[in-house]
Amino acid sequence: MDFSYTILIPLIPLALFVILGIFSKKIPASISGWMGSIGLGVTFVLSYYAAYQYYLNGKVNGVYQPFIYKYNWMNFTDKLHIDMGVLIDPISVMMLVVVSTISFMVHLYSRGYMKGDDGYTRFFAYLALFSFSMFGLVLATNLFQIYIFWELVGASSFLLIGYYYTKPSAVSAAKKAFIVTRFADFGFLVGILIIGYYTGTWDFQELNNPEGSVITNWASTSFMGLSVLTWALILIFMGGAGKSAMLPFHIWLPDAMEGPTPVSALIHAATMVVAGVYLVARLFPMYYFIEDGFALQVVAYVGAISSLFAAIIALTQNDIKRVLAFSTMSQIGYMMLALGVSGYHGHDGLGFMASMFHLFTHAMFKGLLFLAAGSVIHAIHSNYLQDMGGLRKYMPITHITFLIAALSISGVPFFAGFFSKDEILTAAYENNILIYISSVFVAGLTAFYMFRLYFGIFWGKDKEYEHTPHESPMSMTIPMMFLAFMSIAGGYIHFSKYISPDHMPFEAHLNYYLAAIASTVGLIGIVLAFIFYKKENNLSERFSHAFGIFYKWTYNKFYFDEIYLFVTKKIIFGLVAKPSAWFDKNVVDASMIGIGNVTESFSYKIKGMQSGKFQDYAMGFISGGVVIAIVVFYLWIN
Amino acid sequence: MDILSLFVIVPIITVIALGFSKGLKQSRIVALAGMLVQLGMSINLIFAYLKERAVNDDIMVFVKDIMWFEQFNIHYSVGVDAISVVMIALTAVIVVAGIFISWMVDDLPKEFFISLIILSTGVFGFFISLDLFTMFVFYEIAVIPMYLLIGIWGSGPRENSAMKLTLMLMGASAVLSVGIFGIYFNSNIGTDGPLTFNILEIAQVNIPEAAQNLFFPMVFIGFATLGALFPFHTWSPSGHASAPTAVSMLHAGVLMKLGGYGVFRVAMYLLPIGAINWSDFFLVLASIGVVYGALGAIMQKDLKYINAYASVSHLGLVLFALLMFNKTAWNGAIIQSLSHGLLTAMFFALIGMVYGRTHTRDVAKLGGIMKVLPFIGAIYVITGLAYLGLPGFSGFVAEMNIFVGSFQHDDTFHRILTILAVSSIVVTAVYILRMVGKIMMGPLSNPEYANLPKATWYEKVGLVMLLIPVVIIGVMPFGLGEMLKESIEPFLERLL
């Protein structure tokens, strides 16, 4: 079978980026939007074709085979080198489908949403750059290639968050996102260096082989009580946590909502932020086998804590995009914890499969939630919940699609999120009861805050709008309808037939008891939201008063931003950078100037010796002669 | 005429021709023509070198040797390997770009271009020399015009800065000359031949360890001062701040690279035992420089100071990599020299363009320039991203080679220093984004800036010329690395 055509999937957006980027002033908006959409449409078709071909015919003896096309890009040492290439295996094909679907939909949507914007062509150029980088990341054949595209998605995210670059809040959000993730990438890079040195390879096929020398020899090295490779995996996960906004690197994600809403849907909900999950999944055999899964335990707990933490914060936020951002963080926590509790062989790999399944369904319904939120913001020019109400009459399509996505994320039966979440909860239940309980609680919180949004936006009384809100144009509603379809249909794909850690299909069945518990908790959340927010009442205020301090802490996101600000401003700037600048000026430079000054003053003092007066010279000559005579005499008598 | 000496002769002819030209228009055309010839020759040299390398296994090719001063056995001796070839190309690109950027220099244009080209003559001569004495002479030729260029065409406290820069560099060359003479007087040990300055001949001699230990730090500090080694870097921020744009470009872009090149070509090659004995000490200094320069850049308020401290950090990385004695790291060091040369020249050019229009380099006073000057703004952002090591640009290739190479040492000392150096990628991101975010993005800080003149064609040409090699190295690093590694090998063998 030949998958070499998949190389076109990243190359088409790259070509688009180069053309749109260089001629951004020359290409009129009407053409650039179509160019971007058609280009991504082609990658969409290619990706679905690849998925069809691969999942249908990719098996040999019941095991999915990887297909690799690569060439050597840069050599470091005799063994270590970077390849650029394409790796086709079950999870990369699944990611191709996710990225191309969302990217194509967002391109279509942006044609309407960005209409009339000054930088329309520039926007599509950035989107193309992002799509290229994300495809490259997904298809990477080795750890270093992932790192390269990892940095590139970071940079395109920087450009897109800062798209409205004259707005100070957008600029600082873009900077924050880049610097925080860069700090996490520092760990990632050190992890890569460690892996390179101790294993001599970055190639996924060699690293991930359960019988290979890398995994079987993990115990041969140790550092502070753990295998060196475990440290490397933890450091690599640090990079993943940065991109995926896990604790404690999550602070950039809410601010990243300063970017245009289609960008939030594409990058900060569906694709880039799940790169961390993808990275762990990509190296799953290493995480699972090395040190009996110690690093994987770290992944599980970070995921579970982040998931709970974010869901709590999402309860109190008033900016609808920020609620969705925290919701994203919470759902990514789900995916992480699912990987963390997963086994490797056969049915034990349920958590892995569930994580990928949820990644897929989440991309669809969260992408849709953002697009729908964008449609609302487009109509009423505000992000804040208190400015919204009663919009269901004006925006029927937005209303229905948003409702479908909200039902899906809340885990209501027969919607996509129900199936994937159920698999995650089952995997957690079988492996770690503590994480299971927390996850069920998060499911309830999720349903509550989503329906808080839903009722707040679409029900209740009309607010005073500048002009009567109206439904968005077709270019925006069609992508939303497609994603709404996927938010239901996506759940009926039998992921366990296609995706498993050992690439062997297995059978996963719905666990009806657990499903019943989860749906009940979800429904309770929805009902509570109905009571609190369906009609205007003061219940929510009374509750926030009752919970006083807790409410305040939640509303302020547990003061994480303030902590970071303190560390960077006071400690790094104040106690490190400032003193070193002072040291440079007053010690290093001053001592160089001092040498100059000493020389100058010394020469000033001795310049009298060349006075031009004969008497002085004669005096010097005679005294010198006398001194020499004394010395000679002294030496002679000895 | 041999292919290498032309690199000195063409600039000399250009300078003579400039002597006869009048006014800005004539002198810039003459200067540009001469340097375009130089650029063409340097590109030709790359291909000629590759062709010659295929049939010639010598360390240096195109060797030419003429007796210059018989009494002391001083020769005019030239030859190149891959490293000098790429450095020559770098110099030629930056000089031409510098001329485009100085297209409108209004004060004494003829004298300005003469000084600029004399400076570049020194640099070209330095890169082709195989004889320590000739090398030293060319080095001094490069430093002296700097004084005039800053003192006459500079800004701010220019006399003071020019004096500081020249005196510190002269002080360093005094130390360096002692080191070079130390090598010279040990150059016939065990051979009974005459004393020699020829690098390849000295490399055949085993200089006694005591002498190596004594002279290595002199030669190293002598060169590394030019490469902004901590704590001998303070000439660079004030010197750059006062220098005119093209001079800053040439100085940070090329002249500072002589430091790393000299360390590699002279100090480590001729005094390998000294290098090994002193490496830990200087490695600590270089690592401090990497982090310290980056931290210093965070706190600066003047754009040129930011760039100068950033150079301390990035060139510290070159010295750091050289002291790792590892093929991959050395390869990275040379690519880093190229990459930093191009990027820092771009930054200085951009800063010059912003300064020329707004008359301030104060970060606090600038803001939102991209809205008014989209081309300059876009290139500024690209340069910033390239500078902080984004894949696809040369900086990434250089840094990754350095980090991967350095990490091949498995002792704690080298590991810790490597991780320290890696951490600089975070600090670099902080100061670059702080600068780009403040001056290019955000609201327009001053309503008067709304009508700033757009980038002119010569400014665009200058910037694009520098950007092209940055992208080529970043996207297609394969050929360059192989070409350099072959030339690194004989030098590295001396240290292992």
Image: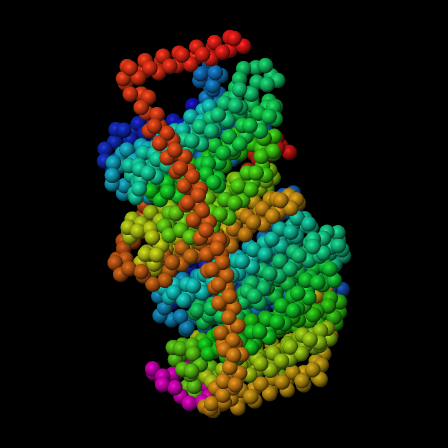
Residue at left 66%, top 57%?
A: A231
Q: Residue at x 58, y 46 (%)?
A: B417
Residue A626 in view: yes
B187 is higher (above) or lower (below) than A410: above
Q: Can residue B265 be seen in this view?
A: no
Frontmost residue, B123 versus A595: A595
Coordinates of residue B228 in the picture (x, y in percent): 46, 40
Q: Quadrant of residue B96?
A: top left
At 45% across and 72% down in the image, what residue appears?
Answer: A261
Total marks shown come to: 0
> In this picture, is A634 found above or below A464?
above
In percent of width and height, residue B327 lies at: 60, 39
Q: In this view, does A596 lie to the left or right of B397?
A: left
Q: Which residue is drawn at 52% across and 51% down?
A: B424
Residue B226 drawn at (x, y percent): 45, 36
Q: What stretch is highlighted in magenta?
A: A458-473
Viewer-side residue, A567 vs A468: A567
Q: How is the image coloured?
A: rainbow
Q: Nearer the viewer, residue A54 or A355?
A: A355
**Magenta segment main secondary structure:** loop
Residue A465 covered by magenta stretch: yes
User: Quadrant where the N terminus of chain A lies?
Assistant: bottom right
**Percent x, y of residue A547:** 53, 83
